[in-house]
Amino acid sequence: MPVDALVDGELTLIGQVAHASNATIVCEATTDERTVRCVYKPIRGEQPLWDFPDGTLAGRERAAYLVSEQLGWGVVPRTVLRDGPFGPGMVQEWIDTPDRHADTPAGLELVDICPADDVPAGFFEILHATDMDGSEVALVHADDPRLQRMAVLDLVINNADRKGGHALEGFDGEVYGVDHGVCLHAENKLRTVLWGWAGQEVPGALVVDMAALVDSLSADFGEELTEHITTAEVSALRDRVKTLIELPVMPRPNGHRPIPWPAF
């Protein structure tokens, strides 16, 4: 059986993601047969937060991946916990993306900024702002089912930090979400730029997937998650999903920091 490069490959540092809140290092994981580009976030590089226990962000990234896989949605790139040059941490497959998306109106990204008076068809307008030149601009995101599935996942995992730059369209045509270190808290922490579907029904196929997730959380999968989050957080996850199944409607912003800042 070939060696799994992401899990057992030698990590070679090739760069660092600038302006990231926590240490975020770009690496290549190499075995004799394969090299995989990845992101390595050592636990020792996590910044303390007032509302999340110290040293738990890497485990939450792994848990978010596991939930996405359990749902069958494939939103989160493969994520493992392992040792590295700066100690144990999270290692996640790198997603290669085009520079711009030529198939979207005006070449916009899935989440982007555009002139406030020129929001293209097929995009939701989330908020207005003023840029550094005093011009009115709008924060927008695409009305795209792949992005909608990500928005539903954010509800499920109670994502407190869905920035625009955390939604990536890969060369394979799939849409991936990254940076899930501040998720799965027992208290409501949802902060996202993906509010375009607020008040709309959750697609039925996603509701079916969530029903299967509830069943698994009461069995072995719930036990597996307790390796990374607390039993209270697993219970809160199950309760959130059950509530969403009973009333499958996307929530509206509650007015208390509903969008992370900065938005990208």
Image (cartoon, grey):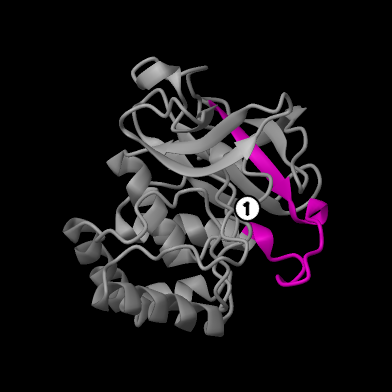
Question: What's under tag 1, amino acid-wise?
Answer: Pro
| Residue 42 belongs to the span the image colors magenta | yes
Query: Quadrant location of residue 263?
Result: top right
| Residue 175 belongs to the span the image colors magenta | no
In the image, residue 157 sits, relative to residue 246, either above or below, namely above
Give the residue at x 56% y 72%. 227
Q: Could you tell me how many numbered marks the image carries?
A: 1
Give the residue at x 40% y 57%. 153
Query: Quadrant location of residue 135?
Result: top right
Give the residue at x 74% y 41%. 20
Part of the protein shown in magenta: 35-58
Q: Is residue 30 visible?
A: no
In the image, residue 255 sits, relative to residue 219, either above or below, namely above
Q: x and y percent of residue 59 in the render?
A: 61, 62
Q: Is residue 171 left or right of residue 61?
A: left
Q: x and y percent of residue 1 in the render?
A: 41, 40
Q: x and y percent of residue 9 in the render?
A: 61, 36
Secondary-structure class at tag 1: loop
Estimate how packed mark 1 is, as few (under 14), some (14 to 19) or many (20 or more) residues with alpha carbons within 10 Å: some
In the image, residue 140 sits, relative to residue 210, either above or below, namely above
Q: Is residue 9 left or right of residue 20?
A: left
Q: x and y percent of residue 134 in the render?
A: 70, 28
Location of mark 1 (residue) = 260
Q: Is residue 99 visible?
A: yes
Q: Foreground residue, 149 or 216? A: 149
Q: Quadrant of the C terminus?
A: top right
In the image, residue 126 sits, relative to residue 189, either above or below, namely above
